[in-house]
Amino acid sequence: MVNGVIAVKVAELRETIAKYNEAELHLVIVELYKAIPKKIKEEKEIDKIVTLEVTDRKKKEPKRRELEVIQAEVEVFLNDAYNQYYFAPNSVIHKKDRPKWRFIVRRLYKELLACVHDKPELAGDLLEKLYKLLCYASGYYLFNTNDPFASVMIEQGEFFYSVVQAKLEKGHDGATIEEVIRLAVCNDDSFFFMLSAASTVASSLKTPPLKELALEQVKLLMKQKPPQKEKEDWMEDLTTIGSTLYLSLFEEEAAIAFFNKHYPAKLEAKVYALLLLLEVHQLPELWIREYEAAKAKGVQRQDLERKYERIKKEISS
């Protein structure tokens, strides 16, 4: 509402000074000028306003680079990064320039986002490459940091969301949705991030037919050999996405059945993961039911028992 308030104040000012004669206006202007601090006069170029030397004060937006030019820089940067030229001593990247990688990534990210609407396929592919680079750098030393996403001041979830939106900008066919799902399971992230990534995938597919198409892709991928990933991790991630898609279709029972059938962990770990999924999606009654069923099978965890008592109390209050 700040702009709205300013507009009202300006309108009121115009209405007030419209009643003044020339001498009164002269007095107001002089007194206002005297009241403005020197620093503000210089910053806002008040003297130019007084002498009617006002120019267009809007800053011109920098000229956007061609996507092909950005692509060339991305490819060079990726090559240098994967070769650890921004981490270890080398003759390619000077020592003083190595810390600048974070500014390069942030600039390229912003430039690519601006190109998504015009050329979604190429822009999306380049964003994906940058995203995968940072994911890889989270587990291997490519830069002098343990958290490359924090270093570029872009949360991993935000970066992932941007890539998904860019991918879907080019279309919502099965092949594109498969790309999005593969991107979500492309690296060894925590289960907490996997829950977030799965929710991003589900919420980005706006209609039930698209969610159902994504479910088909999940089931097809489950039958394939995982690329550079342990089979168990591959199945855990795909199961999490599939169950989240069912939940986004309000098919809670199908989501739970799918999770129990396909999640490959042992009973206690599977129960813990399922309960976390139900908690994230705010399904307390189902949480209670599934925990009670797990207890009947011998699952005993103090933290879950405390949460069980708390949720039961919240439901009954």
Image (tube, rainbow, N blue to C red):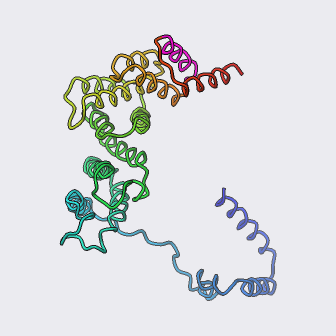
The location of residue 312, given as percent across then percent down, is 64, 20
The location of residue 255, given as percent across then percent down, is 42, 20
Of residue 31 and residue 123, the one placed in the foreground of this image is 123
Task: Identify the image quadrant of the N terminus.
Answer: bottom right
- Over which residues does the magenta segment extend? 283-296
Residue 162 in the magenta stretch? The answer is no
The residue located at (26%, 47%) in the rendering is 121
Of residue 143 and residue 184, the one placed in the foreground of this image is 143
The location of residue 281, given as percent across then percent down, is 51, 28
The location of residue 43, given as percent across then percent down, is 58, 81
The residue located at (34%, 43%) in the rendering is 169
Tell me, yes or no, if residue 265 can be seen here. Answer: yes
On the picture, is 21 further left or further right than 57?
right
Tell me, yes or no, if residue 118 can be seen here. Answer: no
Picture quadrant of residue 229: top left
On the picture, is 37 further left or further right than 180?
right
On the picture, is 108 further left or further right than 309?
left
The residue located at (34%, 31%) in the rendering is 237
Task: Identify the image quadrant of the C terminus.
Answer: top right
Residue 286 in the magenta stretch? The answer is yes
Q: Is residue 217 positioned above or below 149 on the image?
A: above
